[in-house]
Image (cartoon, helix red, strand yellow):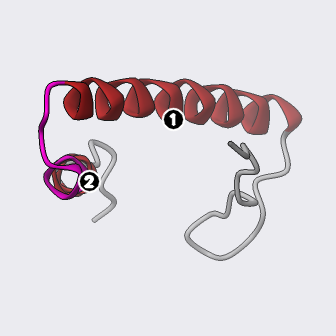
Amino acid sequence: MSNEWPKWLRDDGSVVACTEKVKVMTENFDELKQMAQDAFEDGLLMEVSEQQMRDALHALVDQLVNPYFKV
């Protein structure tokens, strides 16, 4: 499994270049990927449909809320 994450961009298209910020994003996404993989595999072992597991994980992301919404 490759953990090459994208270059992180701000809303204006500029690159987030702060090393510490990029490090935190990388760590967060590495952890998130592993947790999602574990949940996916658990579902498959419990005989849940692979497509339903994928759909549920996509729906989870779609339900995330931006608490910093800018007006």
Where are the magenta residues, as a range?
A: 46-54
Left or right side of 21 for 43: left
Image position, residue 22 (x, y; %): 76, 39
Task: Determine whether 8 is above or below 65 in the image.
Answer: below
Image position, residue 25 (x, y; %): 65, 36
Q: Nearer the viewer, residue 4 or 49?
A: 49
Secondary structure at numbered mark 1: helix
- In this figure, which residue is indicated by the disc labeled 1? 33
Query: Which three-letter amino acid code belongs to the residue tagged 1?
Result: Lys
Give the quadrant of residue 31: top right
Disc 1 versus disc 2: distance between alpha carbons? Answer: 13 Å
Within-10-Å neighbours for mark 1: few <14, some 14–19, many 20+: some
- In this figure, which residue is indicated by the disc labeled 2? 54
Residue shown at the point (76%, 54%) measured from the top left: 16
Query: Which three-letter amino acid code belongs to the residue tagged 2?
Result: Arg
Task: Determine whether 11 is above or below 46 in the image.
Answer: below
Within-10-Å neighbours for mark 2: few <14, some 14–19, many 20+: few
